[in-house]
Amino acid sequence: MFSPAILVIGASGAVGSALIDELVPDHRVGLLRVVGATRQQEVARSLRERGIEVRHLDLDDAEMGGRSAVQPIFEGIDRAFLLTGYHVRMLAQSKVAVDAANAAGVSHLVHLGASAADDSTIEYNTWHQLVEAYVERSGLGFTNLRPSSFMQNLRLSVAASGVLTHFIGDGWTNWVDIGDIAAVAATVLRDPKPHHGRVYHLAAEAASATEIAKLLGETTGQPWRYEPAKPEVFYKQLVAAGYDPIYLRSVRNYLERVANGSLTDPTGIYDNIETVTGRPATSLRQFLERNRDTFLR
């Protein structure tokens, strides 16, 4: 029986680790072989303990070492999941990953980008779309996933008990559970053919921060309120924490435009998760109920 080798790039991240969790049952019964790519030793150790092959991958090595510095990681791989970091280096990193996958004979690549209109002028969205365009012209079989805002990040918006702080003013954004992203990616990687050449925006629903605060009150049984903050606060906090200021500048601009009403997320995309996986997307209410204790302080 053919057991395709599936390389998960970004295995240490939230989406990559959730994807591995989705694929492990198939791995254990020999339907496929999961290979995790990571730079983090602790993550590598944990994956090996689960019987998963680990390959050390640092896509930045290609700048000085050429493609040959990363090429061995892609050898023997049939399908790959590509997720790079949130920084401007994602452009070069993604290009070398696509080139190496192509040279190794990878048959299908699933790329994780960001949900936005095709004519988006927000900088980080255009980076993702440039990567998508390169994937599409590479000759590889491909599926591009465009997730919206992660529900898991709502936990980071709780700085005080009963207070949800966010940066979108009275605007609304689309939301998706990381588990649903992983389920879509796993479905495509198991059987790529029906999804070849497709672009899937991934979102369960749209909601404002005020609506989410109301849901938090209903699911926790405690009073909640929404306190809007300026996107510049978000930018300064994350830059101070060491994140890429160029990438974060464009995220700040996105938040400002959502807040002032000049930009809205794509609509009419809320059935994609169920269409691909056969199971309904996780709603915000379901996510908050499932993670109720993490929002109680």
Image: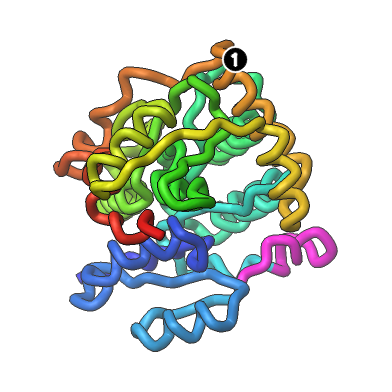
Seen as rendered, the residue at the extreme right is: 64
**Amino acid type indicated by mark 1:** Asn
Q: Nearer the viewer, residue 90 or 154?
A: 154
Q: Which residue is mark 1?
A: 260
Examine the image and state in which quarter residue 270 appears: top left
Q: Nearer the viewer, residue 176 or 292?
A: 292
Q: Which residues are magenta?
A: 57-69
Quadrant in which the C terminus appears: bottom left
Dot 1 alpha-carbon crowd within 10 angstroms: few under 14, some 14 to 19, many 20 or more: few
Residue at image coords 44%, 27% = 173
Residue 194 appears in view? no
Q: Is residue 81 left or right of 184 when viewed as pictured?
A: right
Q: How many labels were placed on the picture?
A: 1
Q: Tell me where residue 128 appears, x and y as whole percent.
A: 59, 36
Seen as rendered, the residue at the extreme top is: 262
Residue 250 appears in view? yes
The vertical placement of 220 against 54, above or below, is above
Asked if residue 63 lies in the magenta stretch, the reply is: yes
Q: Main secondary structure of the magenta part?
A: helix
Q: Tell me where residue 120 appears, x and y as whole percent.
A: 59, 20
Residue at image coords 61%, 57% = 100
Q: Is residue 272 left or right of 48 when viewed as pictured?
A: left
Q: Is residue 57 left or right of 33 when viewed as pictured?
A: right
Q: Tell me where residue 195 appears, x and y as whole percent.
A: 31, 38
Quadrant in which the N terminus appears: bottom left
Asked if residue 290 lies in the magenta stretch, the reply is: no
Residue at image coords 67%, 67% = 58
Q: Is residue 57 left or right of 219 when viewed as pictured?
A: right
Is label 1 in a helix, a strand or a loop?
helix
Q: Tell me where residue 286 appears, x and y as whole percent.
A: 22, 45
The vertical placement of 192 against 103, above or below, is above
